[in-house]
Image (cartoon, rainbow, N blue to C red):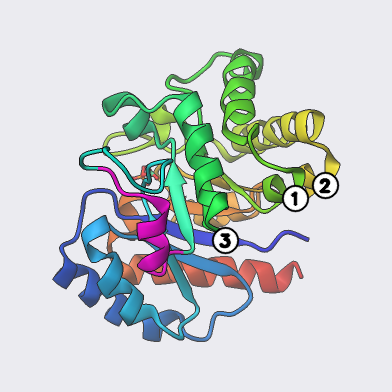
Amino acid sequence: MRRLMIGTGWKMNKTIRESLQYIELLLPLVSGVNNIDIFVLPSFTALQTVHGALLGSNVAFGAQNLFWEDAGAYTGEISPLMLVECGCRYAEMGHQERRRLFAETDETVGKKARAAWDHELVPIICIGEPERPDRLGDVEPLLRRQITSALELLSEAKVARSILAYEPAWAIGVGAEAAESGYVSRVHGLARAIVSERFGCEAAAGIRILYGGSVQIDNAPEFLGAPEVDGLFVGRAALDPLVFARIVHMGSEWARRNA
Ligand code: PGA
């Protein structure tokens, strides 16, 4: 059975000092939670400090982006080696904001996923459509392209241990509304079927598919109970550590009841 994950990416929020304050508030609130995976994705500048603050805890962390080469003439980029040195376990790629504002493509997402695994960083690969579709069938070609490009440079065993985050752009951010849980289940089922077809059933059985997009305390239980949802990737609601801790506990409770 796939282990439930609850995570948050802080986007371009929180200085080093604020990141430390967050972790200091969060850890005592979630210290007893050991039946799910918990992660935070701070900004690059806070990674080293967050590493120190999380040592020995049940909360893992990672970066919101990475470059696909180890070193070289790539001004402004951060390599997987640098992330490993900071103690990261995860590296995110393909977020809608990066696709839209920073020209991230399916091809670069695939290179990043391979570079991450080359250094044993677990990729958290964001996929999802830019606009609300009329029918599920309308998103299939895009999902197929995103998933295939993201995973095609990986072995089946690595695909099985990777993470997809389904985050439709229309459900993300201020003013947006979360997707309906029934729709999310259907998209996740479709994504898993695509993985199975292309990469095999071991890959499809292992890969975890998180939902992200306007997740909050109120709608978290609905998504946790939705078939095919292996966890939640929370944005702005989780900028408050008390809210994130509540959602972590909801996930833990759900996993306990469904063990
Ligand atoms: P949101 O962001 O929860 O603020 O909508 C989700 C995300 O971008 O991961």
Percent x, y for residue 93? 44, 41
**Badge 3 residue CB within 8 Å of ligand 1:** no
Q: Residue at left 35%, top 47%? A: 71
* Lower position in the chain sequence, tag 1 or tag 3: 3
The CA span between labels 3 and 2 is: 19 Å
Q: Is residue 83 left or right of residue 113?
A: left
For the residues labelled 1 and 2, say whether their Cβ atoms are less than 8 Å apart.
Answer: yes
Looking at the image, is mark 1 or mark 2 nearer the viewer? 1
Depth check, front residue: 56 or 141: 56
The CA span between labels 1 and 2 is: 7 Å
The CA span between labels 1 and 3 is: 19 Å
Q: Residue at left 40%, top 37%? A: 95
Q: Amino acid at mark 2?
A: Glu
Mark 2 secondary-structure assignment: helix
Q: Which residue is mark 1?
A: 157
Depth check, front residue: 100 or 254: 100
Q: Which residue is mark 2?
A: 202
Q: Residue at left 59%, top 40%? A: 181
